[in-house]
Image (cartoon, grey):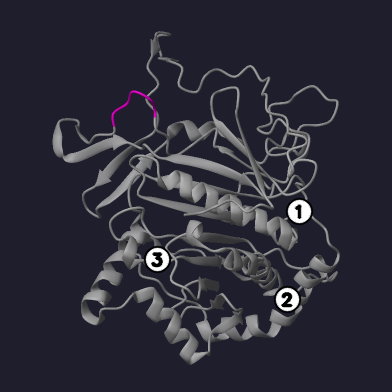
Amino acid sequence: MSTLSPNVRKTGTTLADGRDLFYFDDSEPYLSGSQTRRLDDPRPLTDRYAPVPDETGVNQPMTGPTMRYDVLTGEWIPHAAHRMNRTFLPPADANPLAPAKPGAAYSDGEIPAEDYDVVVFENRFPSLMRVPGVEDVETAFEGEDMWRIRPAAGRCEVICFSPDHTKSLREVTPRRMRTIIEAWADRTEELSQLSGIEQVFCFENRGQEIGVTLHHPHGQIYAYPYLTPRTTQMLQQARAHRAATGRNLLRDVLEAELRSGRRIVLEGEHWVAYVPMAARWPLEIHVAPRRDVADLAELNEAERDELATFYLQILNMMERFFPAQPDGTLTKTPYIAGWHQAPTGEGREDLRLHLQIFSFLRSPGKLKYLAGSESGMGAWISDTTPEKIADRLKDIAPEAVAAVAASTDNNEVTA
């Protein structure tokens, strides 16, 4: 089980509409507890579970998002129509993830404090949400037994990596990255214990090309009430591999990559980064612990310490993968970074923690669009080879490592 590092202090509060918020502090005077971040939320928000008026003006019980079962694929598809009204690319002075402005009237921001280190809160526009009093059961839809529907009774949280909206995650120092890892581990552990949650996914979308609607450096944490299609596929493969060999598939994949060495791009005492043998994206890296670990909460202190630097080195490699701009500035590589964690229950012993980070960008200004084969049939066609990706990453690795070392030498604690 995860235990919060003594170098991080967690403080919880409740926002005006009833959502949870947690500060994760690594700086004084908050780390010692001699001072506390602002805990009250004076916004005139209604309770998120309050009845909602229908088209005739009559209040109806709040129901929340639902999921429908696709009988053709065996997948659950959440439907959250309320997300159509979520914040979309707001101006800097209306950024809901920024800290409150000192001395200003309180705005509709999500974070009450005038500064923070790392903060996590429940999403105001969640795709998954458990509503009190709504039973999590499957029912027939439109009277057809083959069409099944159930509440999307999970949880969605937002994690803010920095109070500075002009920065990106790769620009935080290892000390702050260590705090982010603590927050990921803490939330993984707590969310995994919620009733009905089958897996937890910590991820970051970076770049408008990916679909980011807020440029502030942040990520998300989803607690799913079902196993996602990706996890289901990996679990199927892992079980077949164990039945045939008696071994863990992801362990064997790591050992095979280490034996080859051809696609290894970075190694540490506790972590290994490689381009997977069958990489599908123009830029894709997997990061795995050497020790068999089910999820982030199971990482020990030494693994978390090294990961803080290792993760930033990987992000700096991503940023340097493509040629710099004519003025010498780095090309901002859009990416998705997601932690694949073992399920909370059945199948936990068959899967293994690993990070997948990838980009749609195939060259500066040019995205890989999913054409008919990929989108219609899920039949992937790669425009490059994993070995070419690995060769480029190896070339730029020394520069990326040096950039993180410089941040450490400066002894900065904020982005």
Measure the alpha-carbon separation of dots 1 and 2.
19 Å
Q: Quadrant of residue 409?
A: bottom right
Question: Is residue 385 visible in this depiction of the protein?
Answer: no
For label 1, the residue is: 167
At 47% from the left edge and 78% from the top edge, which residue is drawn?
Answer: 276
Is 314 left, or right, of 34 in this rendering? left
Give the percent coordinates (x, y) of residue 120: 60, 42
Residue in front for this viewpoint, 164 or 87? 164
Residue indicated by mark 3: 374
For residue 349, say whether it is visible: yes
Q: Please, what secondary structure does the residue beneath circle 3 have? A: helix
Circle nearer the viewer, 1 or 2:
2
Left or right placement of residue 226 versus residue 263 in this view: left
Image x and y of residue 81, in percent: 43, 33
Observer-side mark, 3 or 1, equals 1
The x, y position of residue 206, in whole percent, is 62, 56
Residue holding disc 2: 401
Amino acid identity at mark 2: Val
> Looking at the image, which residue is at 60% across and 82% down?
265
